[in-house]
Amino acid sequence: MTLLRMKSPKTKSLTKKQKVALFRNLVRADHFDKMMYRRMMQGKLIAFYHPGEGGLAPGVAACTFLRDDDNLSPHHRAHGMGHMLSKGVDLRYYLAEHTGKEDGCCKARSSFHYSFPDKKIYMMSGFIGYNFAPSVGWGWAAKRRGKGQVVMNCSGDGSYGQGRAHEAMLMAMNWKLPIIFFCENNGMAIHSTALEMHPTEDISSLAKGFDMPAAIVDGQDLFACAEIALAAIDRARNDLGPTFVEAKTYRFKEHDIGTPDLAGYKARTKEEHETMRKRDPLVLATERVLGDGVLTQAAIDKLHGEAEQEVKEAEEFADASAIARPSEAELMAAVYAQ
Ligand SMILES: Cc1ncc(C[n+]2csc(CCOP(=O)(O)OP(=O)(O)O)c2C)c(N)n1
């Protein structure tokens, strides 16, 4: 981990309770992600799915310790699932939405552009860079309220090629807004490598230009990500302004199911996949919790069993729900305010 510049990070070691909470959420995210992949292949999801495998640790770390009244804009990878479950979203409604059912969080009007207003998640969009302008607005509102709310703004390396990202960083820094720019850099944007689109491989180097404190962290290390996330959240809660966090991560699978797994015009190689998979965040986290005596193998097995059960219940809930058949008037009402 390299700290570029981080004023008063107050980075504390994680407690055992915090490590268990993080590990549990990563296990849950892993089970949900694999179920989503399977269902997409079985033709049991509408729209599409961007698999998260290999890159789920940063989102879990960023969101496990958020408060209910903190704003979150989740990254589109895994359709924000790891972020949202870590913030306390009930994923039964996420899956029902994704299967076109009446019990979906947006009554199946949204495909994967969900919203969970009770958790202050107002949108999850596939429109890259969707999050930056609203995050500035939420940050401004949070600052005016003065209740220590923060904005967790998660997105990939690709989104930082957008002008709106740079404008948001400028305004956040000028107005000292409580925003965490949490970049999940998996080195790819569909078929383009990050280095093809950015002058350096460190997206966080952008932060220097805005005099924003920034940190680079190993995105495969769940606990290192969480320490940095907590430090950035702490700065924001204490009105010390925004922080840029860059978590270097991977995606093990193709960009979205059905799209060839290319880098440029060439398939990503077997060697590249093998190298990536040696750093599977769940494997690394499992070794850590066992090695540090945080959890026993029996306790880990229990967490996996509970996650499997949660996934099964979400599938049963979504499958039992009625297919949504909105009228044209209902669809229009879901798009336009009166
Ligand atoms: C405004 C906009 N431009 C282009 C796209 C097409 N698109 C979908 S995902 C993606 C790549 C995003 O890369 P990154 O932000 O690094 O996240 P990753 O998919 O690698 O997790 C692009 C270009 C889009 N959805 N929205």
Image (cartoon, grey):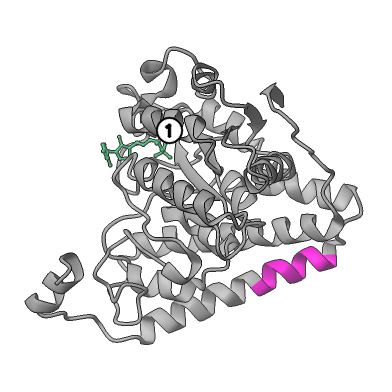
Residue holding disc 1: 171
- Tell me the crowding category of disc 1: few under 14, some 14 to 19, or many 20 or more residues within 10 angstroms, Cα based: some
Please identify the dominant SS of the magenta region.
helix
Q: Is residue 158 magenta?
A: no
Which residue: 54% across, 36% down? Answer: 176
Quarter of the N terminus within the rendering? top right
Which residue: 29% across, 45% down? Answer: 127
Q: Which residues are magenta?
A: 298-306
Residue 322: % across, % down: 28, 86
Regarding residue 186, the answer to whether it shows in the image is no
Q: 325 or 329, which is in the foreground?
A: 329
Q: 43 or 88, which is in the foreground?
A: 88
Specify the amino acid type for callout 1.
Met
Residue 296: % across, % down: 87, 62
Which residue extends farthest left? 328
Which residue: 30% across, 55% down? Answer: 48
Element marked by disc 1: helix
State left or right for residue 292 relative to residue 115: right
Residue 79: % across, % down: 41, 54
